[in-house]
Amino acid sequence: MRILGLDVGDKTIGVAVSDPLGLTAQGITTINRKNIDADIIELSRICTEYSVETIICGLPKNMNGTVGEQGEKVLQFCDILKDKINIPIKMWDERLTTAAAQRAMLEANLSRAKRKKIVDKIAATYILQGYLDSI
């Protein structure tokens, strides 16, 4: 059983996948967004390659728990993805995951350029690991 974790942004989608036992999350790639069709084709390819059974998508919420503009965009993307890929999608509160990813990369002394390239993949890993830890 593999679970895919997504950190969906306007320009990129961070992607992580669980190990076969569903215990740990590993970041696998960052998709540079082109258009909705190309994004879904790439995600579909990844789902097939890793035999994904569930998708966990980070839902950006405001600190007061409400869903803002970016959260609405993610929900719309997931609705389209759900129609195109026959895999269950669960939303996961992603508040502060990008900040945690940035902090971890700063502690690892990664350059700003390197951080920019992998922050979404790391955030997807935090989202997925949070979900895995909860189950």
Image: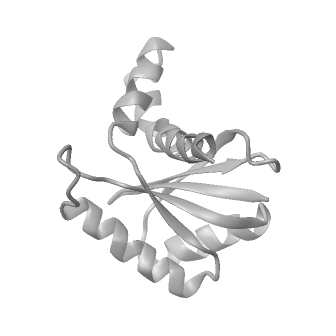
Location of residue 29 in the rendering, given as x and y in whole percent from the top left corner: 60, 49
Foreground of the two, 104 or 67: 67
Location of residue 44 in the rendering, given as x and y in whole percent from the top left corner: 64, 73
* Residue at 17% in and 47% down: 64
Location of residue 126 in the rendering, given as x and y in whole percent from the top left corner: 51, 38
Which picture quadrant has residue 43? Answer: bottom right
Which picture quadrant has residue 102? Answer: top left
Q: Residue furthest front?
A: 135
* Residue at 60% in and 69% down: 42
Q: Is residue 71 above or below residue 45?
A: above
User: In the image, 58: left or right of 86?
Assistant: left
Foreground of the two, 35 or 101: 101
Location of residue 78 in the rendering, given as x and y in whole percent from the top left corner: 44, 73
User: In the image, 70: left or right of 77?
Assistant: left
* Residue at 33% in and 36% down: 96
Q: Is residue 110 above or below residue 80?
A: above
For the N terminus, the image quarter is bottom right
* Residue at 47% in and 29% down: 114
